[in-house]
Amino acid sequence: MSTPTVRIDADRLIARLTELRGVGASGGGGVTREAFGVDDVRARDLVGGWMTAAGLTVTVDAAANLVGRRAGPVDTWMVSGSHLDTVVDGGWLDGAYGVVAAVEVAAALADVSAELAQGLCVVAFANEEGARGTRGMTGSRALVGQLEAAELAALDDGDVSLGDRIAAAGGDPDDLAAAAWDLSRISALVELHIEQGPVLAASGAVLGVVDAITGRQGVDVEIRGAANHAGTTPMALRHDALAAAADFVLAFEQLPNSEDSVRVATCGHLEVRPNVRNVVPGRVVLSAEYRDEDSDRLDAAMPVIQAIADEIAARRSVELALRWGQRVEPTHADPQIVATIERVVASSGSDWMRLPSGAGHDAQILGHHVPMAMIFVPSVGGVSHSPTEDTDHGQLALGARALLDTILALDSARATDHGRTE
């Protein structure tokens, strides 16, 4: 296949990201585009127009995913993209960068009429973030047939069902089977994203090759002690649920310090009853999670956490009950795609490193079914999901260039393999 010189238009990339930033701008630099809402649909329509200008055939599928396709001579597809929805008062690059950069790849190919050996598919996945208390990654899970009727019927924090949200955004929850892909036709999925963490910035690397996307295990903890007068109850006779919770939080935080344990552990939510200054707390509910790229380590941490809970309950004379929450399995990137990306970034002359993704992504869902890898660029200060989220414009262009070169390299390898089998 003919592959003339293809270049990323960095000015166009930044201009489009900046224009998209204005859709749902919430002041102070933040962006609010909750999935399936008015601004989310506006963003989808804007990007859909850019897809059309880049020569893609554009559809909105039954799950409200935005899909742009450029057919090739054979019915296999390279896929790239991310999501357009944001958390409330989030950043301008999380998700949006990966979508707009993938559109720019398609536009760069169209600019010089470059041919490919297979199809190119650019996707903006619906509801990656989990708006209004929903599970999230709705669009990518629809593509692999993982949306169940009970989830579609469940009411969100606004007392609206997920199915109704999808319908309002132009999808068809009654025909989600139509959104499912023939996964055997996907040769590669490459998602470009900001890191959303401090590792690249701290190392000085400007490109990251993601070899795994973290798994996570949630746990909800209920601690029941005895509420009593703070002035009359001696310290030795207390059943203080909050003090027990403090012990649990600190012990949970230490999990990653044990050999062969999980990578990170966080307690992020706490409710105290009765939550007044002069009463010994009688009940605490907290939520925690831990993450790792190894399923065995996720499993091995469970009895350790149970033992911590049992010890605290006995020592503090409280009841401490664990309920295991949502489990998301880790996903490892495809070694061949990782090797391709490594060759691309090494030839760029820029500093790069391998690293896992500590955040979840749509690529994680699809990566259980198709060959997948990710490319990261640094986040300034490691900040994301915040109005201060940012990345140097030159690094944004560099990441888009790495995505383009990876797509071209994967296509060239596919063309060579196809020629050998003819």
Image (cartoon, rainbow, N blue to C red):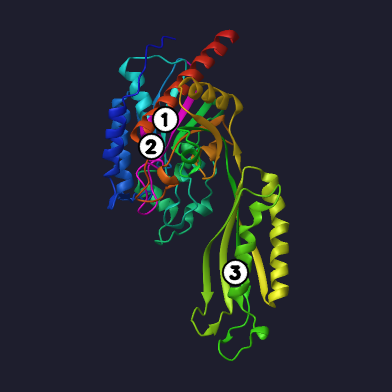
Which class describes the residues within 10 Å of circle 3: few (<14), some (14-19), or many (20+)?
few
With respect to residue 232, does 395 lie above or below? above
With respect to residue 135, does 242 lie above or below? below
Which residue lies under the disc numbered 1?
399
Tell whether position 93 is magenta.
yes
Query: Which element carries disc 1, helix, strand or loop?
Result: helix
Q: Disc 2 marks which amino acid? A: Tyr
Tell whether position 181 is magenta.
no
- Spot occupied by residue 309 in the image (x, y as percentages of width and height): 69, 66
- Spot occupied by residue 237 in the image (x, y as percentages of width and height): 67, 85
Of circles 3 and 2, the one toward us is: 3
Image quadrant assignment for residue 243: bottom right
Image quarter in which the C terminus is found:
top right
Residue 97: mark in rendering? 2
Between disc 3 and disc 2, whose residue precedes? 2
Between disc 1 and disc 3, whose residue precedes? 3
* CB within 8 Å, label 2 to label 1: yes
Image quarter in which the N terminus is found:
top left
- Spot occupied by residue 420 in the image (x, y as percentages of width and height): 59, 8
Q: How many marks?
A: 3
Which residue lies under the disc numbered 3?
246
Please give the range of residues in magenta.
74-102
Residue at image location 63% in from the left, 60% down from the top: 252
- Spot occupied by residue 74 in the image (x, y as percentages of width and height): 48, 16
With respect to residue 175, does 114 lie above or below? above
Residue at image location 59% in from the left, 24% down from the top: 336
Residue 324 visible, this angle: no
Instruction: Compute the Cα span from label 2 to label 1.
Output: 10 Å
Instruction: Compute the Cα span from label 3 to label 2.
Output: 39 Å
